[in-house]
Image: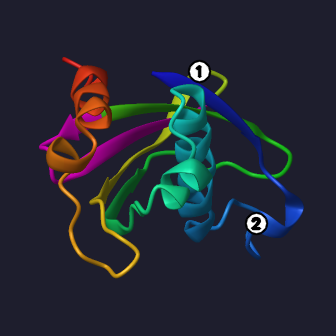
């Protein structure tokens, strides 16, 4: 698990003064890129290797509002990896109170958008992702 901190910006809020729901997806991406950097799996390096990781789906459950200039911590972790699909979990907190629970699902593809099975092409990466799955 990796913790990432995001300070809510004024422009991320809506007319009611709360963080617009769409910005949580941006924060998820920030936290995910930071998480992968921390485990030595930089997105730019993966792309140089010919691997891309598109988003298949996102899911957010909003529990409490946040607003400018709140600091939100985002706990990011691998919740599942099947060898084909990777699921990242996110727990957003403000002052240790959960404000949002979310997840994103990804697969791995080549630049020509063909599925890449990491087990076959990059077995070390495949094993690393399996080892990162959080056991509840």
Mark identifier at residue 96: 1
Position of residue 102 in the picture relative to residue 69 (left or right) = left
Q: Quadrant of residue 72?
A: top right
| Image: 15 above or below 93 | below
Residue sitting at x 75%, y 52% = 67
Q: Is residue 74 left or right of residue 54?
A: right
- Image spot of residue 7 (x, y percent): 80, 43
Which residue in the structure is indicated by mark 2? 13
Relative to 13, does residue 121 appear above or below in the rendering?
Answer: above
Q: Residue 121: x and y, percent? A: 23, 49
Q: Residue at x 28, y 42 (%)?
A: 122
Decide: few, some or many residues near mark 2? Use Cα within 10 Å; few <14, some 14-19, many ≥20.
Answer: some
Q: Indicate the position of residue 69 as horizontal and vertical percent values.
A: 86, 46
Q: Nearer the viewer, residue 95 or 7?
A: 7
Q: Residue at x 87, y 61 (%)?
A: 10
Q: Is residue 87 left or right of residue 90?
A: left
Residue visible at 15% across and 53% down in the picture: 84
Label 1 Cα crowd, 10 Å radius (few <14 / some 14-19 / many 20+): few
Q: Secondary structure at mark 1?
A: loop
Residue 81 spot, x, y in % from top left: 19, 40
Highlighted magenta segment, given as a residue range: 79-93
In the rendered structure, find residue 78 and report the number of the disc placed on it.
none
- Quarter of the image where the C terminus is located: top left
């Amino acid at each position: 698990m990796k913790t990432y901190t995001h300070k809510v910006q004024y422009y991320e809020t809506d007319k009611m003064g709360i963080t617009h729901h769409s910005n949580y997806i941006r924060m998820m991406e920030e936290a995910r890129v930071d998480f992968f950097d921390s485990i030595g799996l930089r997105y730019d390096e993966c792309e140089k290797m010919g691997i891309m990781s598109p988003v298949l789906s996102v899911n957010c459950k909003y529990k409490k509002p946040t607003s400018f200039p709140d600091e939100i911590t985002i706990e990011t972790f691998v919740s599942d990896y099947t060898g084909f699909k990777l699921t990242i979990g996110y727990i957003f907190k403000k002052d240790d109170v959960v404000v949002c629970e979310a997840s994103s699902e990804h697969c791995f593809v080549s630049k020509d958008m063909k599925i890449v099975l990491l087990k076959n092409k990059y077995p070390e990466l495949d094993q690393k992702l399996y080892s990162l799955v959080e056991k509840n």
